[in-house]
Amino acid sequence: MSEQEELNNTSEPTNDSSEELSFNSRVDLSGVKKLVQDIRTEIGKVIVGQQQMIDLLITALLADGHVLIEGVPGVAKTLTTKLLAQVIDIDFSRIQFTPDLMPADVIGTSIFNPKTTEFEFKKGPIFSNLVLIDEINRSPAKTQSALFESMEERQVSIDGVTHILESPFMVVATQNPIEHEGTYRLPEAQLDRFLFKIDVPYPSLEDEIKIIRGSYDRGNILDLSSLQKVASASDIKKQKEIVNKVHVEASLMKYIAEIIQGTRNSSSISVGASPRASVFVMRAAQSWAAIQGRDFITPEDVKNIIGPVLRHRIILTPEKEMEGIHPDQIINITLEKIEVPR
């Protein structure tokens, strides 16, 4: 295969849940299967298509990871996240990032109470189970830094006191890839804390016709009150524990490590993925395998999630960026060079 042919291939997840499985599961995945199907069904009442984004959001939720969603306005990035929170009985908050937003607007601040003559901590919107951050790249690094501790350690430290964030805790951030005026580049340390970066494409012609038809049939009114709660916070925590039991062979651990090492040795990549990426690939593959109904991961699971896990973690060389090469293309070439375990 020529280099150009390799560059034309991208690492996009594929759903293999329709395959017949003829093994005896060592882990009871019936709860995971029901949870995933119920979430898909409820969200599907509103969202047409975008199955990849929905499945990756569910995968991240069960893998205890955060998600960065990138796409042009109007492709249902924010709406899909709101629907995910709507169908699960968890706390939800939304933060609109702007240039004048301060860290205290995110994590909270201490306010003086004249009755007790003491300062009392007032929690910010980060204290929620699912936090949607709209246009995350609209705020400067000072505000971005407010997310570092909460995303990595699931806690907030202020005035010498540590406040633990309740589980599940998931940050879903959105950004626009085409509008750069008034935006700030996200710090690499923050990008590395996102499990996935999901690139949301335009819908197909058939899906767009269904979107128009659905809006017409609803009288151009979007009513989310009809959606049912299909799970609670305790249900999510229980299924996350099940996902952590999905088996990973030693050969697949080596396969993952070799892929990550390959990003550091590629002539097309100036900065490769970190060891955190290795762990995230394994966790994401466990979750992806579980929602397909398997209690073990395969090389295909790794290939299916490798693009969303790595595309925001590697930095291409200036030459490749000038050529307009997408990170997924380089990731795919790296995969081709690694021997797949049997």
Image (cartoon, helix red, strand yellow):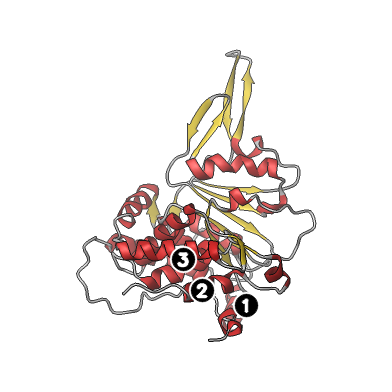
Q: Earlier in the sequence, mark 1 or mark 2?
A: 2
Label 3: element kind: helix
Residue type indicated by callout 3: Ile
Write the residue at 54% across / 31% down: 157
Residue 194 visible in the current orientation: yes
Q: Which mark is residue 2?
A: none
Label 1 crowding class (10 Å Cα cut-off): few <14, some 14-19, many 20+? few
Q: CA distance from mark 3 to mark 2?
A: 16 Å
Q: Nearer the viewer, mark 1 or mark 2?
A: 2
Write the residue at 59% across / 48% down: 189
Horizontal and vertical percent position of residue 155: 50, 37
**Residue 178 as seen in the image, left or right of residue 90:** right
Horizontal and vertical percent position of residue 188: 62, 51
Tell me whether circle 1 and circle 2 mark residues in contact (CB < 8 Å): no
Residue beneath disc 2: 12
User: Which corner quadrant of the image does residue 30 belong to?
Assistant: bottom left
Q: Nearer the viewer, mark 3 or mark 1?
A: 3
Write the residue at 75% across / 46% down: 99
Residue beneath disc 1: 212
Residue 36 visible in the current orientation: no
Residue closest to the far right: 181
Label 1: element kind: helix
Residue beneath disc 3: 259
Write the residue at 42% across / 74% down: 15
Q: Nearer the viewer, mark 3 or mark 2?
A: 3
Q: CA distance from mark 1 to mark 2?
A: 27 Å
Residue type indicated by callout 2: Glu
Horizontal and vertical percent position of residue 127: 53, 39
